[in-house]
Image: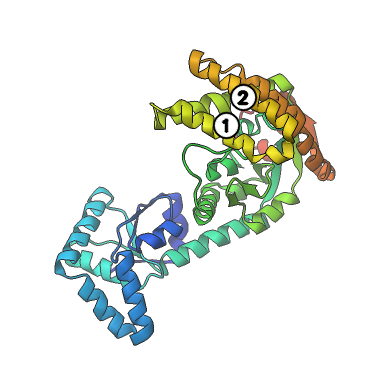
């Protein structure tokens, strides 16, 4: 009997990182997928389009007949061998299509005929996607959030990631959350961001904590947006504001946005890393040119140009601190203070990292000996 995975087991699929065989068409996969899924379609994009058109015009029976005609014996064998190779590497995999219907049922049967038993996901991608959206909404409804705020470069992400009951939204979005926040690898699609966010929540035993700790964010993180219900809950949450001096903050940005980022560019393009990295910096600056004003933009541009030249010539990144500090003092800090003043009634702590460590150690949800963490 062909095994069926129902909704009550979806959490285990994601938490245990069960390999997923996605037999949807490539265009469907590109619009939204799951982290542990591999796309080995039963129908190509053009085949799916033809079958869909026939279904709309002539009905299901004609569409099924066309599908079998398009996927003839040779094509079927080729695709079957691809699934078998995947299952040989991932014998605990599950299979699904969009709604858990004909495509995954047919694929499952072909595999069974070849001697491979693979469970099929009831409801397919659509049901799993609904499950993940519900998980996000349930967290927004049931979990108490604590936000870590602070000016740009305060080390909020570093601090956040030392807690067991945290969610790193910028990490999931693959973006550092500012005009200079782009990384070498592109951001996920909105749907992929939401799917990954939900899966990270499912992995957290947050029902055992009083709070889930997140960084204070605007709704947009680069090109993706925090789901509305989740963000609404964040806006109501208390905020702990981390305060660090300018030198500390400039060093954090220098190491993250310049040092580490440049190494990422170098790994991807060893020969042209300098060009791509300088293009990234200049385009990021251009993005905020209107808000900076012409005078400040031109001044920062000149400092940046000099820093890039020295960086590429001497492999020394220190001159970047000059323009970093100017942007912090004249752009990021005033903007953050303006936004923070609108949340003043939600602030429950202000202090540096060491003071935060002492304060956080007295929170009830950190007094559980099984939940010890080090925030130093």
Q: What's the CA distance linking mark 2 and mark 1?
A: 8 Å
Which of the pair 301/109 is nearer the observer? Answer: 301
Could you tell me if residue 136 is visible in this image? yes
| Quadrant assignment for the N terminus | bottom left
Where does the image place residue 179, in percent across and percent down from the top left?
63, 39
The structure residue drawn at horizontal position 22% and vertical position 75%, both measured from the top left corner, is 68
Residue 294, x across and y down, in percent: 73, 34
Give the vertical position of 289 relative to 328 (above or below).
below
**Which residue in the protein does label 1 denote?**
281
**Left or right of residue 248: residue 254:** left
Of the 4 image quadrants, the one containing the C terminus is top right
Badges 2 and 1: C-beta atoms under 8 Å apart? Answer: yes
Residue 244 in picture, x, y percent from top left: 73, 25
Residue on which the image places disc 2 = 304
Compared across the picture, whether 107 is left or right of 368 comes to left
Check disc 1 and report its element: helix, strand or loop: helix
Give the percent coordinates (x, y) of residue 228: 65, 58
């Amino acid at each position: 009997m062909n095994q069926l995975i129902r909704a009550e087991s979806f959490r285990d699929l994601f938490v245990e990182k069960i390999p997923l065989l996605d037999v949807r068409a490539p265009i469907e996969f590109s619009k939204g997928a799951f982290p542990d899924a591999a796309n080995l379609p039963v129908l190509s994009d053009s085949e799916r389009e033809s079958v869909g058109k026939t279904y709309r015009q002539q009905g299901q029976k004609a569409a099924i007949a066309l599908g079998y005609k398009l996927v003839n014996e040779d094509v079927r064998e080729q695709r079957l061998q691809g699934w078998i190779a995947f299952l040989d590497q991932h014998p605990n995999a599950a299979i699904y299509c969009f709604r858990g219907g004909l495509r995954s049922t047919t694929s499952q049967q072909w595999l069974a005929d070849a001697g491979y038993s693979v469970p099929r996901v009831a409801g397919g991608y659509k049901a799993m996607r609904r499950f993940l959206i519900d998980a996000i909404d349930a967290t927004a409804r049931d979990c108490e959030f604590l936000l870590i705020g602070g000016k740009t470069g305060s080390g909020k992400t570093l601090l956040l990631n030392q807690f067991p009951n945290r969610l790193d939204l910028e990490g999931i979005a693959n973006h550092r959350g500012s005009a200079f926040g782009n990384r070498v690898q592109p951001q996920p699609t909105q749907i992929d961001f939401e799917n990954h966010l939900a899966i990270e929540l499912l992995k957290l035993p947050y029902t055992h904590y009083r709070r889930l700790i997140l960084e204070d964010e605007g709704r947009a993180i680069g090109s993706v947006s925090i789901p509305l219900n989740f963000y609404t809950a964040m806006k109501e949450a208390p905020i702990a504001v981390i305060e660090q001096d300018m030198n500390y903050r400039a060093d954090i940005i220098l190491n993250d946005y310049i040092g580490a980022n440049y190494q990422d560019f170098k790994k991807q393009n060893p020969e042209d890393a300098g060009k791509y990295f300088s293009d990234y910096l200049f385009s990021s600056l251009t993005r905020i040119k209107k808000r900076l004003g012409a005078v400040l933009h031109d001044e920062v541009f000149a400092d940046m140009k000099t820093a890039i030249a020295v960086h590429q010539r001497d492999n020394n990144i220190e001159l970047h601190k000059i323009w970093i500090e100017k942007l912090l003092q004249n752009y990021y800090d005033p903007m953050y203070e303006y936004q923070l003043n609108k949340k003043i009634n939600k602030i429950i702590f202000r202090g540096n990292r060491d003071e935060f460590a002492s304060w956080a150690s007295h929170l009830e949800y950190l007094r559980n000996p099984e939940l010890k963490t080090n925030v130093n």
